[in-house]
Amino acid sequence: MSRAPDAHDRTKSRGDAGAPPADAHPSPARPVSIIGLGASGRAAARLALAHGEPVYVSDTRTDARLESAARELRTLGAHIELGRHDLDRIEASTLVVVSPGIPPDAPVLRHLEARGIEWIGEPEFAVGFHQGALIAITGTNGKTTTALLVTHLLHAAGIDAVLGGNVGGGLAPAASEALLEAPDAPWLILEMSSFQLAGTRHFAPDIGVVTSLAPDHLDRYPSLEAYYADKARLFRNARPESRWVLNADNPRVPALAGDAPGTRLTVGLDASDHQGRIEAGVLVLEVEAGRPEPLVPVDDLGILGRHNLRNALLAALTARLAGASLEGIRRGLRSFRPLPHRMEPVGEVKGVLWVNDSKATNVEATGAALESLDRPMVVLLGGKDKGEDFTPLRHALARSTRVAVLYGEARGRLESALGGAEAPPCPLLREDRGFDEAVDRAFDACEPGDLLLLSPACASFDLFENYEARGRRFAELARAAGGTP
């Protein structure tokens, strides 16, 4: 039984953007099984049905929201089963698609592995229907900002492109949904999480981007090496014509690429030998050696933080490789605005600027935020503990942090890691009540001219449904305190 049909084999030998292979669309009437009825699973089912493929979707959950989704898909012709997986039916499928929310040790996946049945993730399934070129962006931090920036820059340059993948907060749809909305877009841009990369077999981007690499998701992965191994799958099907845009300021990133075929282009803020860099306060590209291309002064960007300068260069370099004009890139860089929950100014109260960086759910993201800001600040740290080592935050906190307020489930371990036997890098205030009380204490500790930063270094699930809800509550408290945008 075939487990990887021709439609997905084409990703091994993708040609130029204007010359897709003849078998770009899958053959009709291949039975497809989709495991998981979340957003990605629903999108994959709709895409398969739109191309006339018999679809079976199963999910072990049975809540009301899934029942509603099941009814919708049944009207389109899908066979939906909630509360169980029909393993015989899945085994009989030509193709098995797994949603990224299904953990790798789920019994259904263990069963497939034991039977030697290969499966793919939803993004790779979607790519099988795409006739144009592919940009894939991954990294521990910065990938959403970079993916949205690349799309914005291409649009500003008049290039048709569609964004999908792991773009949270409703900022972009699942890959399959993106292709339903824009089936003929010449460029598909996908933000790829490690969970999604784990489900790739023949995935081969024309341009691959790695924004950063640091410990994360250790509550799901058995080891740091396993997490990095899934990220490295971006390079699994590299070809001589592949192009890789890499953050050279993070030495783990070039190491992740190893000796993968293709052309490497690097971004670095403090060295002159990179294809994306800063010179005399101006963002500069140099795709062709000896031909530097100035873009815009750093002060013209509408996004905060030194790490976002790097994201802007990664995006600009990627857009340039995709054919964007310099003027289009300049126009796009000037018009791009901060993303929700990512170094987002949400108000100013009595001379204190409140900044929502709730998306900083790991140590590296918070460290980057702290080190990118020179203004004195009070920072909120805490939330659900993901098992990371917090001690690397000591150096970042020592730069310009006036006070750190520790809250949530992780507050005790944060206090031990940042205090302990050594002198703390800044005064630590432990708040044992709730989030609102922690914000109140942080604001009380501020002085006029300070920055009040929510950059928690932890997940949100102890007190909130997700990081977006945490960020929205922070913004609500800023407004309640009299904040002005």
Image (tube, rainbow, N blue to C red):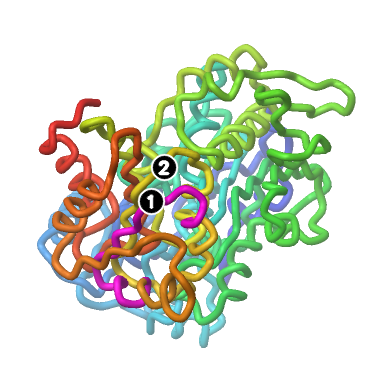
Left or right side of 379 for 154: right
Identity of the residue drawn at 52% across and 87% down: 114
Do callouts 2 and 1 mark residues in contact (Cβ within 8 Å)? yes
Residue 409 percent location from the top left of the image: 26, 72
Question: Of 241 and 438, which appears nearest the observer?
Answer: 438
Residue 451 percent location from the top left of the image: 35, 40
* 379 over 180 or under it: above or below: below
Residue type indicated by callout 1: Arg
Report whether residue 438 is seen. Answer: yes
Identity of the residue drawn at 44% across and 63% down: 97
In the picture of the structure, the residue carrying the numbered disc 2 is 376
Asked if residue 409 lies in the magenta stretch, the reply is yes
Q: Badge 2: few (under 14), some or many (20 or more) residues near its Cα, within 10 Å?
A: some
Question: Of 443 and 269, which appears nearest the observer?
Answer: 443
Whichever of labels 2 and 1 marks the residue nearer the N terminus, that label is 2
Label 2 to label 1, Cα distance in Å? Answer: 6 Å
Under tag 1, what secondary structure?
A: strand
In the displayed orientation, state which residue is furthest to the bottom: 114
Quarter of the N terminus within the rendering: bottom right
Identity of the residue drawn at 45% across and 56% down: 122
Query: Which residue range is magenta in the image?
Result: 397-414
Residue 55 percent location from the top left of the image: 35, 58
* 145 over 98 or under it: above or below: above
Residue type indicated by callout 2: Pro
Asked if residue 324 lies in the magenta stretch, the reply is no
In the picture of the structure, the residue carrying the numbered disc 1 is 402
Identity of the residue drawn at 17% across and 51% down: 440
